Image: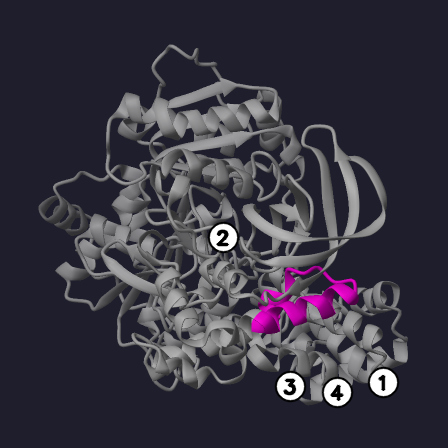
Amino acid sequence: MGEEFCQTTLEGRIERVTYRSADSHFMIAKLRPTGQAGLVTVKGHIPEPHPGETLRLQGSWQYHARFGQQFAVTGFEVLLPAGVEEIRRYLCSGMIKGIGVKTAERLLAHFKGETLAVIEREPERLAEVRGIGPEKAQRIGAAWLAHHHVRALMELLQAAGLPPACGARIYKEYGSESLAVLREDPYRLAADLPRIGFRIADAVARHCGLPISETERARACLRHLLEEALEDGHLFMPLAVLAERCGTAFNLDYHAVQEALEHLAAEGEVTADPEATEHPVYLTPLYAAETDIARRVQAMAQIPMPAAPVDTERIMATVVQRLAIQLSPAQLAVLESVFRHRIVIITGGPGTGKTTLIRAIVAVLAAVGREYQLAAPTGRAARRMAEVTGRPAATLHKLLGFNLSEGRFERDQDDPLTTDALIVDEASMIDVLLMGHLIKALPLQSHLILVGDVFQLPSVGPGTVLADLIASGAAATFALEEVFRQAARSPIIRQAHQVRHGLLPELVSVAPQDPLPEFAFIAEDRLEAVAQTVVALCSRRIPAQLGSQGGYPVQVLTPMHKGVVGTIELNKRLQAALNPQAKGGAALGGRFHLHDKVMHLRNNYQKEVFNGEIGTVCALDAEEGRLTVDYEGRQVEYEEADLDELTLAYAISVHKSQGSEYPVIVLPMVTHHYIMLQRNLLYTALTRARHMVVLVGSAKAVAIAVAADQPRRRQSLLAWRLGSGSS
């Protein structure tokens, strides 16, 4: 990185911010040192730095081989301006939400050198100024307090040796109570902030010298480790592993761990299952979901199916009449068998006829007058299901009637769905919690048909429901292998099946001057060259070849978030290349510009927007700190505090692409992503494309992915419970 020197202090005014991450609070800025000519580069974690601010920085000088001398910040102090001109520059920087240039001038004209004191101590007086009513005065006062509270919070976290990025999460959870919570009840964070809360609490408690109960600390640690396992897709941790981690990673006594585990179990937070050989310890909702699925599936299997509604000839006649298609013998055999089993799984790769079978099943059910419903895990998958069937399809959350105010599903065994049959597409995306809710809401005598590709990546949420149902034999499974002639003409489908069967796809490198085929490979060995090629493909080469398809026809998928060709870096480059607003327009949260392509990151039932939905920023007000995203005609507003639910979506992870299709996929494949290169990841990426796939990188990376067919096993006992195990 470069040579580093001793710690020192640097004071000066920020002239411009060249980079800022709203997630981590890392920034790079140009600072004009007090009493010196010229600018210096400073870098480090400072929340919401703005031009015009005067800072006193602690840190050290470093020499970077490429960028020269830089000041690496380890601590900071904001020096508030005193004179009218300095206050004007400070307020006009836009750092206080609700105060732009015009408002700043009116405030200064009225309050002069007392402006900042009034904002901090008497914000209601701001309403004395023309154009500022009581409501806006209150908002400005709250924005000032939030701005300075976050910085005080950051100072405490830095002093405790914690990453400054934690500050935004803590402030969003507790607001103006953040500092009080940290100083008085830090282990509360372990329950409120999954994954990061315990480590923060532990560090702050030590730094502040707070009295610590070993049992309370062990409780927080157990909760932390189980939530960490959940985030990694596991349903439980074996007791021995859990106790060992508490001891080696956090120096907790075994007896304190045992006592804490008993307390958590008594309070219903965790459940230990002594009947299973590994003595698994679950967060209770995960245990309840796994056992509910097993019990309900076994109960459904005990109820005999009624006679098939139609015979072979009538099935064929119905399909031909209603859909104008002729089923293959294999498809017809599956269609006949579907009506003999209460729980059915239809799985297969692209081009094997899954969609045709869904349409055929719907046609038969409609012809014989049976009630049915169609659903999928995501809005995108449900919309596509409705398009191909011509019938309404809902998300599983909507089907189950999620109640926002109470945080629960309305439909359950006491208020079940009213349907003879339920067909669910993209079933590989269903995690154990959602399946637990679904199976409880489905009448035992209903017909459940799950359709999905078990070779794709597992669900983002915990568990491996589809694979476990298949492995247990609890569901009648029909694996479609034949790729139909029309689909087989698609190079994308052919190469996807090559990958699925562990064979290398045909990588014929395309010259820069040649048109891109449907399945293209561009060989690049250097990471920087791969990144530059991806940007050139998205901004020039593909649009020039395919013409305008409206919006953003190209979707970049990548295996990882970090690195030169990870989502973070590629999004910055693609934003600069594809959105002219990014060159000079106002940015919100240091990242988002008008017309940016963005993705929502977690289910937000209040906004009715869900994990993985992609939209476009259609309105942005930097002064008021809000933006609006258009999701296929539906507009959703975000305040600045909500921005951690959004990310740029020019490049997204392969995991986030599940359940979606895109006209064109560009996929960097480099050996630096070695840890993530898996066969199911490459297969999933290829099957997201409708018209074109372009791989950029090395043939070696593709070969590594194809050979790696041992994805990390998730801890789940669903298959065991469905088979010979206890449920």
Dot 1 corresponds to which residue? 211
456 is higher (above) or lower (below) than 243: above
Q: Which element type, helix, strand or loop, lies under badge 1?
A: loop
364 is higher (above) or lower (below) than 693: below
Q: For this rendering, which residue is in front, 658 or 328? A: 658
Q: Which quadrant of the rendered structure holds the N terminus?
A: top right
Dot 2 corresponds to which residue? 590
**Residue at (63%, 47%) from the top-left corner?**
31
Viewer can see residue 724: no
650 is higher (above) or lower (below) than 210: above
Q: Residues within 10 Å of mark 2 (few under 14, many from 20)?
A: some
Q: Amino acid at mark 2?
A: Gly
Q: Is residue 49 left or right of residue 386?
A: right
Alpha carbon distance from label 1 to label 4: 20 Å
Is 155 colored magenta in this rendering?
Answer: yes
566 is higher (above) or lower (below) than 21: above
Q: Nearer the viewer, mark 1 or mark 4?
A: 1
Q: Which element type, helix, strand or loop, lies under badge 2?
A: loop
Dot 4 corresponds to which residue? 263
Q: Which element type, helix, strand or loop, lies under badge 4?
A: helix
Alpha carbon distance from label 2 to label 4: 44 Å
Q: Amino acid at mark 1?
A: Pro
Identify the magenta region. 148-171
Alpha carbon distance from label 2 to label 1: 39 Å
Mark 1 vs mark 3: which is more N-terminal? 1
